[in-house]
């Protein structure tokens, strides 16, 4: 397993990580590993479930302009992987 060193992390972030780790009864290192795994590890979510969640989030967007912005990015021609990354970021899967 690799080691990552991150210089200049703001004190507020470090304090928040420490607080969350303490609440969960785990180390700071484990909390950071959990966050990274939850964000970057692929999930085995069925395609239908992903599409359902996208539709739900899409319908919940507060502004028509937000939908139009996303649609225009699709029309501009984002690659499929870029579009998926954008959807994940927007819909926080």
Image (cartoon, grey):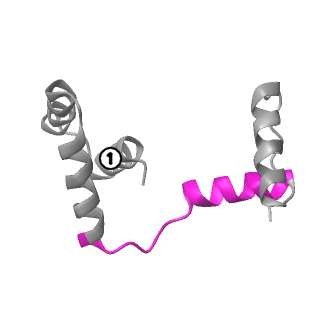
Pick the front one: 91 or 36: 91
Image x and y of residue 90, in percent? 36, 41
> Which x, y percent locates residue 7?
83, 30
Residue 83 within the magenta-colored segment of the rendering: no
The residue indicated by pointer 1 is 87
* Highlighted range, magenta: 28-48
Packing grade of label 1 (10 A; few <14, some 14-19, many >=20) is some
Left or right: where 7 falls relative to 44: right
Instruction: From the top left corner, tell me how far across and down residue 37 is, in percent.
Output: 63, 60
Say whether residue 35 is visible.
yes
45 to 12, vertically: above or below: below
- The secondary structure making up most of the magenta span is helix
Q: Is residue 3 visible?
A: no
Position of residue 42 relative to residue 92, above or below, is below
Q: Secondary structure at mark 1?
A: helix
Compared across the picture, whether 38 is left or right of 16 comes to left
Which image quadrant: the N terminus? bottom right
């Amino acid at each position: 397993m690799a080691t990552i060193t991150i210089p200049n992390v703001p004190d507020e972030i470090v304090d928040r990580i420490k607080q969350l780790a303490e609440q969960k009864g785990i180390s700071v290192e484990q909390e950071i590993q959990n966050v990274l795994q939850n964000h970057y590890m692929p999930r085995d979510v069925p395609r239908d479930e992903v599409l359902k969640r996208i539709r739900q989030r899409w319908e919940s967007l507060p502004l028509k302009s937000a939908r139009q912005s996303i649609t225009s990015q699709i029309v501009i021609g984002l690659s499929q992987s870029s579009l998926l990354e954008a959807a994940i970021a927007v819909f926080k899967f």
